[in-house]
Image (tube, helix red, strand yellow):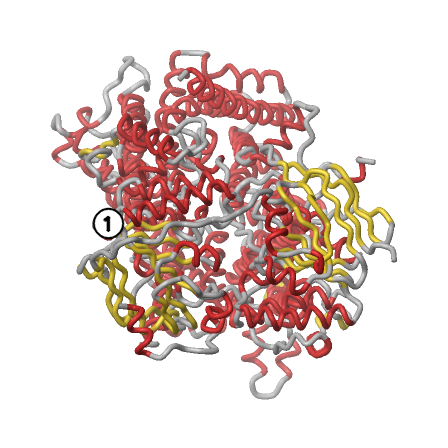
Amino acid sequence: MAPLLQAQSIGKTYPGGTVANDGVNLTIMPGEVHAVVGENGAGKSTLMKILFGMEQPDTGQLLVDGKTVSFANPREAIDAGIGMVFQHFSLVPSFSVYENVVLGSEPRHGMKFDRAKAIAAVRELSERFRLHVDPLPAVGDLPVGQQQRVEILKALYRDARILILDEPTAVLAPQEVAELFVAVRSLVEQGRTVIFIAHKLPEVLEISDRITVMRAGKTVGEVMASEVTEQSLATMMVGREVTLRVDRATREGALVCEIKALNIVGENGTTLADDLNIKVHAGEILGLVGVEGNGQAELLQAIAGLRPIAHGVAYLDAQSLGPMSVRERRAIGLASIPEDRIAQGLASGASVAENLVATKLGDRRFVRRGLLDLKAIKAHAEQLIAQFSIRVGNSRAAVGTLSGGNMQKVVVARELAEQPRLLLVNQPTRGVDLGATQFIWKSITQARDGGAAVLLSSADLSELLALSDRLVVFYRGRIVAAFISAEDLSPETLGTYMLGLDRQDDRTMRAALR
Amino acid sequence: MIELLMTMFSATFFVTVIRTTTPLLFATLGGLISDLSGALNVALEGMMLIAALTAVIVSVYAPWYIAVLAAVLASGMLGGLMAFFHLKLKADIILVGFAVNILATGGTVFALAIATGGDKGTSINLQSKAIPAVTLPWLDAIPGIGPVLRSLLSGHSILSWLGALTVFLVWYFLYRTPWGLWLRGVGEYPAAPEAAGIPVGKVRAWSLVASGALVGLGGAQLAMFNYVGFTRDMTAGRGFIALGAVLLGARHPVGAMLAALLFGFFEALSIVMPNLFNWIPSELIQTIPFVVTILALVLFSYRAQRARQMRTLSKL
Amino acid sequence: MSARSYSRWSAVGRETGRAALALLIAVIVALVIVLATSTDPLKAFSTLLTGPLSSNRTIGLWIDDVAKLTLTGLAFSLVFQARQFSMGVQGQVYMGGLFAALVAMSPVGGTMFAIPLAVLAAMLAGAAYGFLPGYAKARFGASEIVSSLMLNYIAILVVNFIVRAYLAPAGSGQLMTKDFPDTAIFPAIIPGTRFDLGIVIALLATVLVWFLLYRTAWGLKLRLVGHNPGFAEYAGIRSSVIMVSAMTAAGAIGGLLGAVFVQGRAFGNIAVDFDGNLAFEGILIAIVARSRPLAVPFVALCYGYLRQGAQLMGLRTDVPSEMIGVIQAIIILLVASSFSLPGRKTLQRWFKPRSRLPAGASAGEAR
């Protein structure tokens, strides 16, 4: 049987010197589910962008059905039968489902957009591939799982023979993943081919027929799923035995942060979090588990002062945070590592030194009578650069020129420069390489050991399980489960709560919430 | 006071309002299209000015409809130029827009002086033409309301009728054709149309060209009907008032039309009022449209803000 | 240490080179226009390029322009650094000019306090007028672009009205006031010319704005808000307060320019439409200077020269001075587009073809 799609010796170097792909080979057989695995930064996304025509390779070639092709833009890839579902959906929020699905290839009646035909076509596809979704509502109102189905329908509407799914399970709970796999199998039964990009190994082994492993921009191997184990795959991905472990908290400190009956309402009136009751003590890490968008990030934003609290109270060291401004909260020992370092955590155009001092402009060490003490600021920056091993030429360089891991280190350095009382952490190692990840984990646990109370939210369950001393599970803005320790907890158990299929009784929860 | 009210409800006042609204309407629709595609066009003022001058100069040598066409082409090309600098050379759209405005204020006076052989103020020495008015004498024949209808509907510029039609055409384009869907998608969330293979840059470029073409009609109306001939700085801020109208009209063609009518109404008032109230200085009357724009802008933004807050509070 | 200063100077060199390139292109276009429209292109062009140096008087005119251009350039630079597009400098100039004139024409005008008080009044008026669009944005979310532009027109109309109806000599039909008493007019630095206090004020303002932006906490907050408002809020900086104060401070500078206009030796009175749209040329100055206060006077010097040349060309030859509008537009377009990397690459490709392939070399070439 001849391969359906082949990539041969693909090379791609981005301006700035990053070698994203180096001699990458990929062979996809018709009718199979093929997984491409690798860590963050291994080059998977770049390869997929090249397959989809969003980037052009510097060297190498692509073959479809044995013929050389090159895609100058996504339209050409779509015409060749390749469809892609991105991790971050490309859906226009105010457009309806059917408008989003047919966008760019609308059925027409002369000059007029034939809406009835579009709706019928979407319904038919939805039935055929078991991707049930109502064509009419606005996509912005739908939950994430349904939005993903719309994305897949988009590709199927254009007769994609090959579907590329980029980390589709990153935003799904375990049971939603099972539904997705049902759809994938039905796609394969009806003659399509699926390429699956992932780094969650159990899922990869469950669904795929063959697996290509990438590491640091190269392909390191192509194996049959039936012939490998999780451990051997992980070794191929990382190149060494990986055991990321972290020491647990040894003692329990005083109550630092208390949340009582907290209620958060969003801009369009929907309740984002309701009746939250949490206690965090000095010297412990409380992990916030939940599918993204169920209230964890909103809670952290409310405590940080970036989101108003509708009802209830949040205390830091027995002081109510509600009436305090962000500046005042920071002054009493609150530090926060935000979810998106580029949008929120840094000013890319400003220098490293300016970024490092930005939260301390009320501090007499750096600002006296309104005037900046440039020497002190520079010394402070240089000390932090050394302490946190930030790789940068000098402190005047613009922060936007650093790599992702180093940018995150700047954020961490700034927030942990002084021992905080309460540390809020959201997605600390997203898009960060392994070395920086270990360093950041160490910094967080050091802060904890220094007496900080830490609230940690992450989309990476293994990170939560590795770092947290205690855990609470969020579902639809409420806490549905709490656990005193992370030992013996499996992702499946957590998944049951994450998807609202189960809820702990109040007594068990209260005991664990202390 | 009674005089003022009586004037406001007269047929001639209505005709005046239509006349003042027409350039504003075209400019607002132009601004709407480019705003919906994600490229805010602050050069409406300059485009209108250049279109006005083009119409006047070309009409000296050619029939009026050629002059109108020339105006449309000129400002359409300006839109293309803006697209080039913004999309290909990555210049900020606001700065590009202001560059066009500066080009227009200086460039039109310069071109005017060259065309008139030295007159930098007006084109009064040029024999420029006017757009014909559409008289509908047969309306008189309708029993009963005939004469009233005639006084209301007869005598408008052809472009005014075109303007009304354009509102419908713009609405149809935006909400009933695929390309309107593309344009709105590009403006709201460009990643989506891009992933669908829609050329986002081209859509924005064409929206700027279309925006220019529409403004061009406004400029032609201004210099060939509202006034006949070109005077320096004759647009007097209409392009910026149009921007206000785009925001006020909730970014929808019908809203744009209503907002343009509102501002046209006030401009008409400022024409009529000096005759009735000659103790109010003309400068202060001229400030009325600008003050109204600010008030409307503030009110509208405030209401949008309050609506968001109310939705948050009502859920408690 | 030396590596850092080298890279700083090379950055300055690159920026200057870019600006000079834009200027060159604009001048070439001007040459083409002059060739096409003038009966004596050589005279026109030579007046444009050498006119300002032709006499002490023209040099004085040039420096006078430089002072004014510097001030408006500083005002725009301040708001641009905060990424606010408030275009209200012209309105602030008129308000400032009005209040300076009021002080100058009052009994205080005859005393030695006339100049400082008038300047102060102008700055306060300008600051108040700059505050308005800022407040509207902070409190109501109203676009500062539209509101500031509207306020410009309102200010011009109101000030013109007041001048015409109340301040000009009654019944004369004149559109300007009598000259201010000598104590209210800036003294000349070089007697007999327009080289007066205005340029000193402009240079002092430059240093002041630089100091505010780069040596104070307020300035750092302003620049951070300009870089990333989301980050500023997260860090505890009150973005709306900063934005409003930036526009207010810029308004004070605009008001100051108004005082320089009416109290400068060039006028010594207030007239209808007295700024001749000079306020908007600050946009060009700010863009070319990349909103950096220390660069503003230099850009003003070069651009002021060109501007003066165009005025003289308009007076002495048959090419209207408004042609400079074309030059301005071209410079803005060119400089604005080389702001970010892709634009620069395009220009580099045109002027300095190198062997390094830009990203996007097609796959088809590799066999």
* Mark 1 residue type: Gly
Disc 1: which residue: A333
Q: Quadrant of the C terminus of chain A?
A: bottom left
Compare residues B122 and A491 and report the one nearer the observer: A491
Q: Chain of mark 1?
A: A
Is residue B177 visible to the viewer in this orientation of the structure? no
Is residue C73 visible to the viewer in this orientation of the structure? yes
As drawn, A86 above or below C39: below
Compare residues A253 and A335 and report the one nearer the observer: A253
Callout 1: SS: loop
- Name the residue: 69% across, 38% down: A22
Q: Residue furthest bottom?
A: B143
As drawn, C4 above or below A472: above
Residue C222 lies, in percent from the top left, at 33, 40
- Name the residue: 28% across, 34% down: C256
- Left or right: where A393 falls relative to A214: left
Q: Quadrant of the N terminus of chain A?
A: bottom right
| Quarter location, residue A454 | bottom left
- Name the residue: 24% across, 42% down: C125
Residue C67 lies, in percent from the top left, at 35, 25
As drawn, A444 above or below B117: below
Compare residues A459 and C35 and report the one nearer the observer: A459
As drawn, A245 above or below C79: below
Residue A316 lies, in percent from the top left, at 22, 58
Residue A255 lies, in percent from the top left, at 21, 60
Label 1: how many residues lie within 10 Å, few (<14), some (14-19) or many (20+)? Answer: some
Compare residues A189 and B270 and report the one nearer the observer: A189
